[in-house]
Image (cartoon, coloured by chain):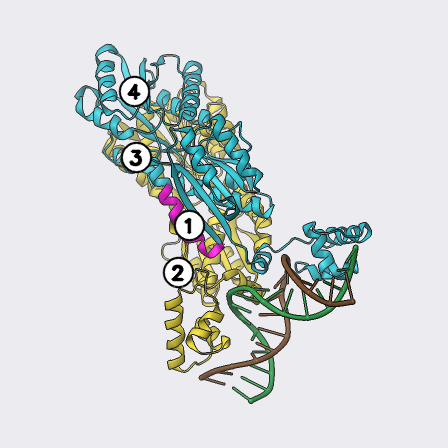
Chain colours: A yellow, B cyan, C green, D brown
DNA sequence: TTGTAGGCGTTATCAA
DNA sequence: TTGATAACGCCTACAA
């Protein structure tokens, strides 16, 4: 019961190795009759290609690129760290990984950088930027060069990506809502929702999820209009001060995206806020410490190591034209409290 | 900057391929001077072995065995399913996986089965049974035959295992306590703790974790003595009925191990229990449905797919005498509510 | 103690 | 359109 090889197929089909290889890899023309015999032999013997041997013969190396948003952002920093960690672990696996930072807030700048890529030196790209028409076109261009593209962390539903590696942000928002609802059992009141809006689509979906769960399961809780503070710490401070003054029934804060550090700073400055339930997104050095210090009650997170490894596995599978193991590539929405922090 | 091969090492060191191979694999004697030159060349060129090429040459196959507790148990069933799923996905990766079920409740039976193993046909074993002196000896025996052993799900701290794949149950218990404390904000009362005690050590550790968190952070909540019902549904029904009668302040149930189905059945039969907060362990068909039906508030889980793949990766790394990527093998304590169910 | 030659499963090159 | 033959990086006889 050993695994059949190309030799076995050749013998069974009564042709040479090369002919087998040709039909297996769809190279030059093969007489239909022979092609059929090869396919029959493959079927009969249950042949599956040994990818590693193939890569050895091809001297294949996978060249992948991560395109990440630049600028100070703790979450992106943890991702970049995970990429470098995975890269060094994967170097033995014939994969070379690079990282490129782009100004995600400027669609034209993003596209400019993407257009400059030497696609001939690339097998796959994992891209984390907000979707714009320009980005959509740039991705189509990359793909037309035979380079695989996965949407990374932020989905690009209208682009022709090969895969999306990340969580369903609608469900993430619902999860946050469910936690807030349970943490505030038997209580009524309002919830302050803040975000930096850096990656707009994600925040919007999370907000929808939050609203759906609150209105359905916890109507006693009311989420206030989303406050966006565009990298302006002052803005959030003012917002919080106003909220505590205006909303006597303020019970919780839901921080939907980046900017947790500013939010926490503001929180610390106003003693009246210390009793609030706080749910935030993304496990970073900042939120980790805040969990330990009991300033944040729960963090909704996605495991960055898993994200990165999943992107690499998916890209490799695409290159090998091999099936991906769906269950393994499912990125989970993690709930982190102090006690299950890792 | 291509990866150096054994050829490069041989040339650099001025010796033949076989000599390089010999020092790389510590085979027969090599003159110290040559050995040193080879090592220097390896160091200088930064050589790392291509494991896949090596396995190809060796025609290596990894033969692994999972030893799981038999008997009706939803959690073990999901593990077995994950093993078979991983096995078929890994067949291309030169690994053969088998599963053996043992009567974990009977240490002698377990040892008997372990002793019967043909260790010559095995490279590694992942073993999920409670630790007993007999088991400890059996593991020493397996290891002395050159077969690698990982403790799986249940730790075997006093045995000579190569690794433990699973969660820290003390932290898991703390996580449960933290959730109960937060779900019962501003409330005082008692918590019923139940377990089947099938895997004793795990339940004990979870109980310790629970108690620590409650006494430290939520002293207003009191956990009742652990009720063990040994596969006896009747037992838990009676327990619950008594609890609701005796404990007017009963607020929650913490189900520490298997037997969630029986617990839920009992719960459904007593309308007075429907308002209780319920936290359970392990994501199975039963707990999944209960989450959807709002009968369970949260499940503490470990991803079985991750568990199985981690065990396989670790065993392979041991066989290859290669380093494991610690971060990837860290099994997380997952908190699952209805909204982040997967 | 050391080196040479061949093979693992696949692909690439060339000539037929 | 097909088939030898020689790689790829490593390991294992066997010979020296």
Q: Would you call the spot at circle 3 few (<14 residues within 10 Å), some (14-19), or many (20 or more)?
A: few
Q: Residue at x 35, y 27 (%)?
A: B257
Q: Secondary structure at mark 4?
A: strand
Q: Quadrant of the C terminus of chain B?
A: top left
> Which is nearer the N-term, disc 3 or disc 4?
3
When the figure is inspected, residue A263 is found, relative to residue A37, above or below; the finding is above
Q: Nearer the viewer, mark 2 or mark 3?
A: 3
Q: Is residue B122 visible?
A: yes
- Is residue B190 or residue D15 the one in the foreground? D15
Q: Which mark is residue B87?
A: 1
Q: Say whether marks 4 and 2 touch (CB < 8 Å).
A: no
> Which is nearer the N-term, disc 1 or disc 4?
1
Q: Which mark is residue A160?
A: 2
Q: Position of residue B271 (x, y in %)?
A: 17, 22
When the figure is inspected, residue B280 is found, relative to residue B55, above or below; the finding is above
Residue position for label 3: B72
- Magenta span includes B92: yes
Q: Say whether marks 2 and 3 touch (CB < 8 Å).
A: no
When the figure is inspected, residue A208 is found, relative to residue B137, above or below; the finding is below
Q: Nearer the viewer, mark 3 or mark 1?
A: 3
Q: Nearer the viewer, mark 3 or mark 4?
A: 3
Q: Would you call the spot at circle 1 few (<14 residues within 10 Å), some (14-19), or many (20 or more)?
A: many
Give the left or right position of residue A159, taking residue B115 as reference. left
Q: How many marks?
A: 4
- Is residue A122 or residue B256 the one in the foreground? B256
- Magenta span includes A196: no
Within the image, what quadrant is residue A247 found in? top left
């Amino acid at each position: 019961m050993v695994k059949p090889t190309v030799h076995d197929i050749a013998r069974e089909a009564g042709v040479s190795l090369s002919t087998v290889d040709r039909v297996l890899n769809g190279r030059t023309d093969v007489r239909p009759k022979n092609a059929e015999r090869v396919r029959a032999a493959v079927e009969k013997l249950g042949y599956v290609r040994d990818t590693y041997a193939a890569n050895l013969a091809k001297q294949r190396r996978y060249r992948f690129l991560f395109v990440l948003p630049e600028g100070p952002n703790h979450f992106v920093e943890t991702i970049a760290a995970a990429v470098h960690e995975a890269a060094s672990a994967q170097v033995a696996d014939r994969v070379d990984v690079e990282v490129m930072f782009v100004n995600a807030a400027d669609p034209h700048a993003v596209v400019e950088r993407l257009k400059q890529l030497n696609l001939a030196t690339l097998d796959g790209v994992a891209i984390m930027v907000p979707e714009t028409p320009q980005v959509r076109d740039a991705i189509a261009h990359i793909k037309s060069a035979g380079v695989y593209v996965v949407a990374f962390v932020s989905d690009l539903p209208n682009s022709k990506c090969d895969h999306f590696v990340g969580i369903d942000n609608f469900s993430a928002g619902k999860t946050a809502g469910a936690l807030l609802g349970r943490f505030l059992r038997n209580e009524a009141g309002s919830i302050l929702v803040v975000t930096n809006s850096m990656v707009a689509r994600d925040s919007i979906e999370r907000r929808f999820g939050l609203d759906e769960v609150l209105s359905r399961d916890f109507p006693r809780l009311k989420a206030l209009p989303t406050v966006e503070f565009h990298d302006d710490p002052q803005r959030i401070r003012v917002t919080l001060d106003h909220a505590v003054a205006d909303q006597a029934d303020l019970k919780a804060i839901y921080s939907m995206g980046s900017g947790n550090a500013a939010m926490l700073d503001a929180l610390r400055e106003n003693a009246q806020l210390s009793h609030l339930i706080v749910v935030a997104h993304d496990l970073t050095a900042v939120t980790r410490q805040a969990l330990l210090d009991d300033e944040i009650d729960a963090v909704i997170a996605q495991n960055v190591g898993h994200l990165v490894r999943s992107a690499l596995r998916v890209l490799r599978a695409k290159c090998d034209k091999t099936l991906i193991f769906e269950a393994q590539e499912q990125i989970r929405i993690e709930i982190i409290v102090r006690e299950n922090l890792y």
